[in-house]
Image: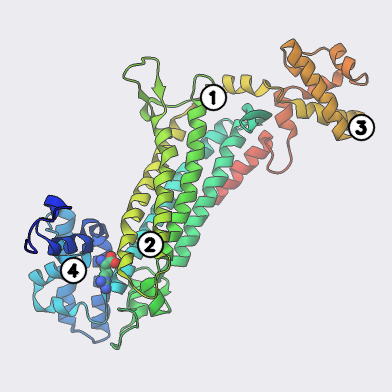
Amino acid sequence: MTDKTANQMWGGRFAAGPDAIMEAINASIGFDRRMAAQDIAGSRAHAAMLAATGVISDSDAEAIGEGLLTVLSEIEAGDFEFSTALEDIHMNVEARLKDLIGAPAGRLHTGRSRNDQVATDFRLWVRDQLDTAEGGLLALIRALLGQAEAGADWVMPGFTHLQTAQPVTWGHHMMAYVEMFGRDLSRMRDARARMNESPLGAAALAGTSFPIDREMTAKALGFDRPAANSLDAVSDRDFALEFLGAASICAMHLSRMAEELVIWSSAQFRFVALSDRFSTGSSIMPQKKNPDAAELIRAKVGRIFGANTALMMVMKGLPLTYSKDMQEDKEQVFDAADNLMLALAAMEGMVRDMSANRDSLAAAAGSGFSTATDLADWLVRVLGMPFRDAHHVTGSLVALAEGRGCDLPDLTLDDMQSVHAEITDDVFTVLGVENSVNSRMSYGGTAPAQVRAQIERWKSLLE
Ligand code: ARG
């Protein structure tokens, strides 16, 4: 057997032998072509800077800049031939530039390395994703505000342990998600502010002896400043990890909301009707309308958090500075970003389209002795009973109602007084769910007036 003979284990794909295996494991062009626009923007900024500092001639810089635009338009038009032999996007672009403009192409890589080049490209790519996520979150928050505004005073059960706890308002429940996605928004913004430093000009690892102007390239690429340590600049991938961390938390939030929509849209709850646009029918059971979009959103956190874990493991224990391990940083980030944006868009659409069933919400709000706490509070407030005793008396009243198969407001005054003689007619004023929610006026509480104040606060924040 010669080197070129098919390997018995790997079979056909690597029939060409070790050279082909090396090419297959080494190449990143299959995925890093997604950074073509960023690569070309970085190279154009670099070439313009090399001319401005006198490292290359103006005419060479001009040929390079023009040639790169041609390469970009070829890639965008889909008639660029990517070569695996050329390994990655950086070398594919440079090789094509050489075809187009000849000798000046060879001057582009002066005072630069693929190490700072890839760090720059990937940072620009992730920065775009942070901006896209911000847009997606803002749209979702606006959709939630719309739901909250429509039903600021609609009553529904609030749950702990998924057991009916106390009545709350629909608006309050929607606004809880606004707070969650609002934190995601601020995490994306924080990450963007911290990551916005340019690695370009760090070169291979130590900087360069050419009189480059890193401020100039940083500014041209929209960075706030050049990264201050060349070793760190080429080996840092925190920016991608912070994006994945923020994306993971956001996807976790999306999964929680998705789970509620799955439960709420079931025949047993009927709290919401999801639109047909985000549901599917069953091929065998004619009555079914399945919340597929919600279920898929619920699942997305798996791959997004998986990407976060994967990149942490790639980076763990790597010595300074660049190691080829770091080429494994991209695919998972691409996949996580694509799926986060899709999940945000789907959730926004579902929230906009869904209709809350006000009657079902109200009926459920009053069941399960949801105003028991209001009754206990009445005993404390009106009769001056210690809360622990009030809790006990209320428990007996709940047991009584349960025995009768009725709710608390259905008990008679005689029933009430059989448990505690001092109870008066006035107690019935607190047993209604409307009264219950209206009374919860503490800051951040569920009273419609508090909910409306929070809606207004968010609207002015978003202006
Ligand atoms: N394709 C490489 C990556 O994605 C580019 C950097 C290669 N640098 C090197 N010294 N081999 O990380």
Question: Which residue is labeled 2 in the image?
Answer: 314
Left or right, residue 24 beside residue 319:
left
Left or right, residue 344 beside residue 208:
right
Colour mapping = rainbow
Q: Give the mark nearest the N terminus, 3 or 2.
A: 2
* Percent coordinates x, y for residue 249 in the rendering: 50, 49
Q: Give the mark nearest the N terminus, 3 or 1.
A: 1
Q: Quadrant of residue 352?
A: top left
Amino acid under disc 3: Gly
* Percent coordinates x, y for residue 452 in the rendering: 63, 38
Amino acid under disc 1: Phe
- Crowd tier of the residue under label 3, counting other residues whose Cα lies within 10 Å: few below 14, some 14–19, many 20 or above: few
Q: Secondary structure at mark 2?
A: helix
Q: CA distance from mark 3 to mark 1?
A: 38 Å
Q: Secondary structure at mark 1?
A: loop
* Percent coordinates x, y for residue 283 in the rendering: 31, 19
- Nearest the viewer among 312 and 60 is 312
